[in-house]
Image (cartoon, helix red, strand yellow):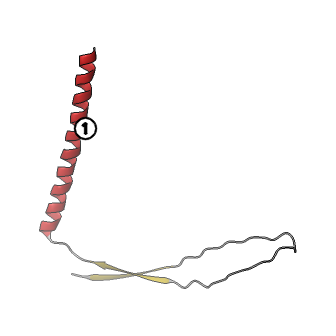
Amino acid sequence: MNTLLTSFQLIKLSNHNEVRSNNYGNVQFRQDITPKTVTYWQTKEDTLHFQVQICAVIEGVFTVSSMIEACVYKVMRMLLKVS
């Protein structure tokens, strides 16, 4: 199921510099900024794809925790061996 979402965004930038002496030249650029149109497509993913992503996140958590545990184990072995 594809859903078309349309949003509008207006961006305005302003920069004002005062020239305090008549000895300096002045160049000004002015531009009217029109709204920009952004189009988003929202699609529904398969359930299998979602389950694979969840399993990847869980496996990543186990991997990082095992690396942290290995570092803590090595540091503790090193500290106990020195003492």
Label 1 secondary element: helix
Residue 11 image offset from top left, x and y in percent: 55, 76
Placement of the C terminus among the 4 image quadrants = top left
Q: What residue appears at the point 87 percent right and 73 percent down from the top-left corner?
A: 23
Say which quarter of the image contains residue 6: bottom left
Disc 1 residue type? Ile
> Position of 7 compared to 60: left or right?
right
Residue picked out by circle 1: 68
Q: Is residue 47 left or right of residue 34?
A: left
Up the image or down, 27 lies above or below 69; here it is below
Query: Residue 33, relative to residue 72: is it above or below?
Result: below
- Residue 59, percent from left and from top: 17, 51
Picture coordinates of residue 8, whole percent (x, y): 46, 81
**Residue visible at 24% across and 82% down?**
2
Is residue 30 toward the left or the right of residue 56 in the image?
A: right
- The image quadrant of residue 54 is bottom left
In the image, what residue occupies the spot 24% across and 77% down?
Answer: 43
Locate the N terminus and report the quarter of the image it occupies: bottom left
Instruction: Find the residue positioned furthest to the top.
Output: 83
Residue ID at (23%, 29%): 74
Q: Position of residue 25 (x, y in %)?
A: 80, 77
